[in-house]
């Protein structure tokens, strides 16, 4: 019975051209990597590597337990303080992934009696978080503030969370944070902003840049695995909310604490990102230039989204680029919220100017041929 069911699912995927496979890479395969999320190039920074190695030597390979048992290290506190200070928030709590941070905040604050209003392009981790919470869900069209207002007005007096990303992971555009915060304040809703693609690329993040940091009704989640070149996640906001998570968020309580090497790497990376803001300028300048060349909308952060005519066309372009020594991301259904397959190009700061110029020319040629 199981064999047939799995084989049927594989055949359906294959028929739709949607089979995915894991493609291992070596530590340095000579390919220009424009597919990753190591936006500031900090993963390989000597200070980040050293901090990770030293923390592993001092603390060991893992935190050893969940945070409420013996898995809370003073090192976690150091990172949480640094993140809160950088992002202008009263406090921070770290998690073993950004995925866990999102699962935790939504499932701890929303239950069957709550309402969640979510942008249609929200990340899978937030969608799963709403499922875990069992809250009633209203999905609104992408970046549609009027639809958010209508959803809030339709259920006055109900505890409501509004979910948005500061920079969207697939489309690469930006949320209207100021307007969303205003609408939430009018209706007594909490705004949860996933800054996975905002922190680092926009210094302390777009919540901070829009003057919303520290507001008790605007909570932030972040990942340590993109601009901070490590692994892990964080929730930032009032201490009362963080204490609530420590006491009630199952993905936090029943998960082992963030590994020492990841914690120390993220701490070192945050310190470098804070003191080297030009790293973010380099990558944003690059992707905006390439967007202009390709005739696609300018990205709000480090993610350039290039729509392709079909899943097959997207895969073919990705393969052709790899043959030319350039690795880009390829998103197809079901990973794309609007069903449009696309290449995803990111310009990590570890890529040299010469490499970027060469890659941009190859992308222009191959994308032109496929489109
Ligand atoms: N939120 C967004 C918007 C993301 O893009 C990602 C990572 N793809 C996550 C959350 C999850 O973060 P992590 O990889 O640290 O689990």
Image: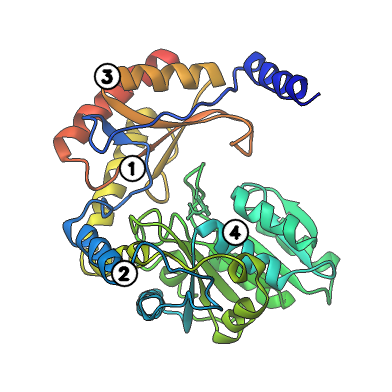
User: Which residue is depicted at the point 58% across and 22% down?
Assistant: 19
3 and 1 marks in contact (CB < 8 Å): no
Residue sitting farthest toward the left: 354
Q: Say the numbered circle drawn on residue 139.
A: none
The CB of the residue at mark 4 lies under 8 Å from ligand 1: no
Residue wearing tag 1: 288
The CB of the residue at mark 3 lies under 8 Å from ligand 1: no
2 and 1 marks in contact (CB < 8 Å): no
Residue wearing tag 3: 324
Q: Could you tell me how far apart the alpha carbons at marks 3 and 4 are, in whole angstroms?
A: 36 Å
Picture quarter containing residue 69? bottom right
In this rendering, the label closer to the viewer, 3 or 1: 3
Looking at the rendered structure, the secondary structure element under dot 3 is loop
In this rendering, the label closer to the viewer, 4 or 1: 4
Image height check: is 161 above or below 245? above
User: Which residue is depicted at the point 35% across and 76% down?
Assistant: 75
Q: Earlier in the sequence, mark 4 or mark 1?
A: 4
Q: Say the numbered circle drawn on residue 164.
A: 4
User: Which residue is depicted at the point 25% across and 66% down?
Assistant: 57
Q: Say the numbered circle drawn on residue 267.
A: 2
3 and 4 marks in contact (CB < 8 Å): no
In this rendering, the label closer to the viewer, 2 or 1: 2
Looking at the rendered structure, the secondary structure element under dot 2 is helix
């Amino acid at each position: 019975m199981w064999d047939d069911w799995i084989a049927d699912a594989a055949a359906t995927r294959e028929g739709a051209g949607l089979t995915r496979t894991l493609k291992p890479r070596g530590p340095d395969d000579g390919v220009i990597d424009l597919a990753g999320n190591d936006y500031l190039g900090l993963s390989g920074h000597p200070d980040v590597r050293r901090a990770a190695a030293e923390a592993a030597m001092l603390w060991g390979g893992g935190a050893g337990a969940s945070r409420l048992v013996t898995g809370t290290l003073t090192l976690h506190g150091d990172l949480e303080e640094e993140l809160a200070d950088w992002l202008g928030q009263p406090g921070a709590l770290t998690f073993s992934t950004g995925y866990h941070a999102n699962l935790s905040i939504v499932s701890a604050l929303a239950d069957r009696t709550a309402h969640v209003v979510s942008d249609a392009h929200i990340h899978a981790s937030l969608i799963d978080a709403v499922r875990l919470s069992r809250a009633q869900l209203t999905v609104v069209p992408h970046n549609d503030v009027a639809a958010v207002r209508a959803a809030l007005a339709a259920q006055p007096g109900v505890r409501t969370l509004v979910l948005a990303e500061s920079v969207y992971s697939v489309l690469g555009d930006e949320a209207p944070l100021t307007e969303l915060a205003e609408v939430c304040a009018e209706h007594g809703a909490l705004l949860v902003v996933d800054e996975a693609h905002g922190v680092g690329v926009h210094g302390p993040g777009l919540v901070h840049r829009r003057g919303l940091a520290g507001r008790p009704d605007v909570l932030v989640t972040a990942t340590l695995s993109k601009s901070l070149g490590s692994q892990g996640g964080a929730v930032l906001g009032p201490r009362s909310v963080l204490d609530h998570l420590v006491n009630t968020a199952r993905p936090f309580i029943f998960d082992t604490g963030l590994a020492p090497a990841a914690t120390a790497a993220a701490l070192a990376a945050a310190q470098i990102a804070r003191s080297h803001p030009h790293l973010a300028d380099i990558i944003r300048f690059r992707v905006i230039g390439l967007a202009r060349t390709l005739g696609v909308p300018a990205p709000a952060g480090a993610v350039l989204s290039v729509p392709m005519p079909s899943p097959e066309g997207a895969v073919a372009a990705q393969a052709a680029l790899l043959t030319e020594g350039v690795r880009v991301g390829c998103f197809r259904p079901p990973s794309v919220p609007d069903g449009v397959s696309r290449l995803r190009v990111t310009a990590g700061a570890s890529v040299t100017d010469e490499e970027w110029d060469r890659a941009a020319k190859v992308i222009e040629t191959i994308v032109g041929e496929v489109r």
